[in-house]
Amino acid sequence: MDYSGKLLIASPSLTDPNFRQTIILLIQGNDEDGVVGLILNRISDNSIREIWKSMFSLDCAADLLLYVGGPVFRPLMALHTQEHLNGVEVIPGVYFTNIQQDLKRLVTDENDHLRFFVGTAGWSEGQLLHEIIEGIWYLAEATHELIFSKDAELWQHLIEAIGQNLLSEMLHTNNFPKDPTLN
C-alpha cells in the first residue's frame, strides 16, 4: 500500500513517549520499502528564526515555531503550499521539501500554510502495516485543513470522531448522537 498523503493517528493505548497522542503525516513509503512521516502536533520551544541564524548565520523573516517531526534526526524540512518550489506533492496543494534553496525562499515567507520540521518518524519494511493491524495507529486521509491546523486539541477531536464512527459501524446506525444521554 502507498501511504503517501495519509495521516496516522495514535491510538489512546499507544504509550511510547515518542508517539503518544500524535498525528503523523506520511510523506512517502509503502509496505515493501518502509515509510517516512512527520509528526504534525509536536511544537518545539525553538523558532525557525533561531535555528536558521545558527545554521546559516543569516536572518530569517519567518518567526514560526519549529515542529519536531519525529525521533529520527533529520535536518531542516518544510511543509508548504508554494507550487513553484521544488519538492514532493504530498496531497494536492501541499508540498514537502528539504532542499536548502527552497528552505531559503520559504524563510522569507510567513503564512499559516507553512511549517518547518526537524526529525522524522519512520517504519521499516512491513512494520507500519503490522502496527495498524495491531490497532496501534488509525489511518485516515490527510487534508489541507488537518495538516495546517492550529487546534491544540486536534488529536483528541480526531480520536472522538474515530470512536463515534466505530460505534456507529458496530451499532449499524448513522445517526448516533454525540451525547446519547440527551436522547
Image: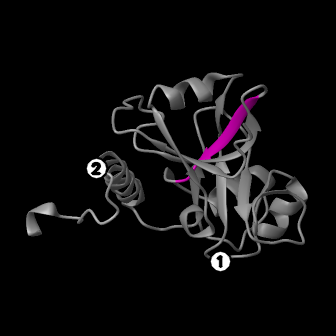
Display colour scheme: one colour
Q: Residue at x 40, y 53 (%)?
A: 155
Q: Is residue 13 above or below residue 154?
A: above
Q: What residue would you read off at disc 1? A: 111
User: Which quadrant does the N terminus fall into?
Assistant: top right
Q: Tag on residue 70?
A: none
- Amino acid marked by disc 1: Asn
Q: Secondary structure at mark 1?
A: loop
Label 2 crowding class (10 Å Cα cut-off): few <14, some 14-19, many 20+? few
Q: CA distance from mark 1 to mark 2?
A: 43 Å
Q: Residue at x 35, y 62 (%)?
A: 174
- Amino acid marked by disc 2: Leu
Q: What residue would you read off at disc 2? A: 171
**Residue 112 left/right relative to 23:** right
Q: In the displayed image of the protein, which residue is found farthest to the front? A: 172
**Closest to the observer: 112 or 123?**
123
